[in-house]
Image (cartoon, rainbow, N blue to C red):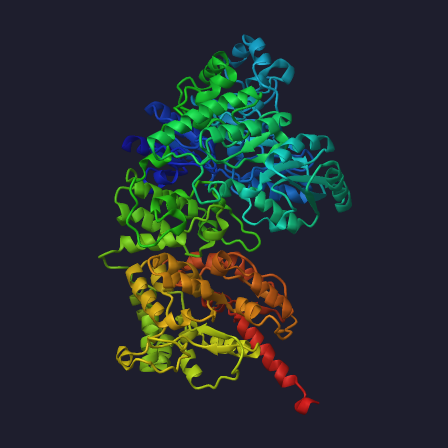
Amino acid sequence: MTDLEAELRKVVRGDVGFDVTSRALVTMDASNYRRVPLGVVAPRDADDVAGVLEVCRAHGVPVVPRGGGTSIAGQATGTGVVLDFTRHMNRLVTLDPEARTAVVQPGLVLDRLQEAAAPHGLRFGPDPSTHSRCTLGGMIGNNSCGSHSVAWGTTADSVRELDVITARGRRLRLGQEWAGAPDGLRELVDGELARLRTGFPELPRRISGYALDALLPERGADVTRSFCGSEGTLGVLTEAVVRLVEAPRARALAVLGYADESAAAEAAAGLLPFGPLTVEGMAADLVPSPAALPRGAAWLFVETGGESAGEARARAEAIVRAADVVDALVVTDPAVQRALWRIREDASGTATRMPDGTEAWPGWEDCAVPPARLGPYLRDFRALLAAHGLRGTPYGHFGDGCIHVRIDFDLLTEPGIARFRRFSEELAELVVTHGGSLSGEHGDGQARAELLPRMYGPEMVGLFERAKGVWDPDDLLNPGMLVRPAPLDAGLRFSVLPREPVDVAFGYPSDGGDFSAAVRRCVGVAKCRTTSVSGSAVMCPSFRVTGEEQHSTRGRARLLHEMLAGEVVTDGWRSTEVRDALDLCLSCKGCRSDCPVEVDMATYKAEFLHHHYAGRRRPAAHYAMGRLPVWLRAVSRTRTARLVNALARLRPCARAAKRLGGIAPEREIPRVATRTFSRWWERRRASVQGGDLVVLWPDTFTEYLSPSVGRAAVRVLEAAGLRVALPPTVRLEKPPVGDGRTVALDPLSLLRGRGHVCCGLTYVSTGQLDRARAVMRRMLDLMEPVLETDAPVVVLEPSCAAALRTDVPELLHDDPRAARLAAKVRTFAETLERHAPDWTPPRVDRPVAGQTHCHQHAVLGDAADRRLRGAARLTGELSGGCCGLAGNFGFERGHYEVSAACAGEQLLPSVRDAPDGTVVLADGFSCRTQLEQLAGVRGRHLAEVLAGALEEEEANAPEDGR
């Protein structure tokens, strides 16, 4: 391997990676399979590709082309050298609006092509649900389709010419009329014309096998079309000329509700004469919340186009009238359409969990039958599932007869794997009986290639092998795929994971307490690899900034998988490779909500750091910022805030402090409040005696760094008629609820001293989980009287609220008090909405800018905040993404550039582009600090904005009622 790597480095100008991280990141795609490569090469151009092929051929090492790595059947994995086209060969070379063509490199992400074509009223027709991260090369390799194939066909229908390098180094320009055909291909076809004319089923989604029938003379001897869907086994694509189609000026979406899945399937084919752009289907068990959908237990998503919104709506309404539906909805608003489409697109991830949380897997992801046979096929398919004691939820391209399904196979035990094989064999027979194709979109790969003789017969499969021999006589390219395949039950990615649960700190309640099951959640659909973020989405900011797989949620999950496997990553929890990949994880928790399978990388990072540094010295930042509550409490007790602030303003002192604390030199040290929120509270008199009791949580940031937020919250809560109390500061044996001044009922408890509640967030984010548990248990001791009341716990800092809702019960899974407290946690807006529903907030009448806190987006939700802003006449939307400071992350040495780049993605532009008079909202202390340090802008908590408006109302109110 050393010689191979050295020779590759001599001939390749791109990146050559034979290190642990590079190899571990590509052991899997989105399938059930795993292969460990020797190395990874990211070529810069076709010359690099040719050089890799020459060196690997000399060493007898296989080569596997890879795009976005979202293949479902295993064809993007290999044991030799993997070519990663996403890093360098990812350009849109040219776009010709007049000719309606584009020249693209194989690593170009589909959405980038769509964005470039859109201003010209054009688009690329096929659009898989992974359009934000799949590549054109991968789409050509799999002959991908997507939801619009009823209108615009498959990728093969959209490709004009291909530049290809064969395994023996020939550079070919593929086209029609035998253009670019390798020697011997025409002779092979001429000798098998009868077989090629009769041996392929006629259906819109026949993707399985090689498309040798495209080489028939009556079909134009189209070498380009025959190459599509070859899964990297015939040649390596380096450039493509693709055809664009005219995009409708307006679209409408008709969502048709049916009583069940079979009724929806029966109806789909009957809608095709209306010329829809899409006919997609899914059932209720894939929809987390069907509130946005019309009544029914299954739905068809039917899109229509037109020159105007009225024309598109009229076509959609005609379809509704013709369809026999339970209920229907027609939408023309683009934002609402996008929201509805996200429900369908997320099914590829959502389907990996059954409604009861059981794991489900691909393998029979996309069989296709003639659309008119879809209803009967689905009934037989359901019966076959039942006969094997399996469950799965079909969804997908009903208009094309193509069904996606994840099935709850047991791929961990020998009996389960044996059942997987038996079911696969019987389902292949069933698909063929209905005149279908084993693959209708994602290719055969390893998952189905073994069963191709059942679909085509041994003679046709033998012809496939001969064609492969013409293109690649040395079997260098992606061996084991399509022809001479590996068994469908070999090399399963789960077989290398530990059989016994790993000893961990968190409870992982959604995964049965099993860390391996938590890591298995990542199935590789790679929604985290999107290069731009829209709406309120957050995941994955570090990938968008770096563009590197190891800094995506999927990349980190792959490294954790390999850490548990112990074959590539061999030093377990002590792995520096895993540590380095997790280092740029902001713990924003965006993946917890934005990932379709709710991978929670922030928790996995905390778990890893806990084990990685067990018994060892930690980075200085863990002591400086992980134990921030301790240092701030010491400053408060010694009343040295002014001294600390003065020293922080002296450059030599600040420089020394930052060096010792592992803090980025570019950062300013935030000022400590000279009077804490609790001290202010102790010296005031409550203005409300009645009303619902609410307990205001004095989090570390509000208490010591931003007490103005706490004071403002008290002002607003009391104005709303609520009675505010603070948690007890000593442990009480009995109620009442403390308010920060309560005297202990048990005099002995005074000896234990006054304490302050803390959610343990800073300890969790730095992986100091033993200390976090101790802090949390002390907090629960203090909060016991509160747990006996109906009072909500109002938390102003979103990250602390998220920690109380999730981290505390998941880390203290053995303490029932943690779950009881989590159920009481309310955000500021939720408290006003639930406990002061008749209160009318003051009218601010100003636009807003800023960013929804990432933890609020991921864990808490912001619906109540939106309604409160609307009631206060705060207009406009907050941006998504992450501010990039993310607690300790942006302060740590070495993180400044990534932190600033994350802020520059959405937060800073939203503020800089805001008109005069805009209110800059930032509920999180980190967000406010980032705005101040990078943009010189003061962001305010919503409570501060409302409190200021109340003061203005009072100031402007007439005296004596006049």
Q: Position of residue 25 (x, y in %)?
A: 38, 40
On-image quarter of the C terminus: bottom right
On-image quarter of the N terminus: top left
Q: Can you name the residue that lies furthest to the top here? A: 191
Q: Nearer the viewer, residue 832 or 484?
A: 832
Q: Position of residue 156 (x, y in %)?
A: 59, 27
Residue 652 makes an appearance in the image? no
Q: Nearer the viewer, residue 413 or 535?
A: 413
Q: Residue at x 67, y 49 (%)?
A: 334
Q: Residue at x 62, y 84 (%)?
A: 954
Quick check: 93 above or below 649? above
Q: Is residue 11 left or right of residue 384?
A: left
Quick check: 459 above or below 66? above
Residue 894 makes an appearance in the image? yes
Q: Nearer the viewer, residue 330 or 911?
A: 330
Quick check: 42 above or below 599? above
Tally of numbered discs: 0
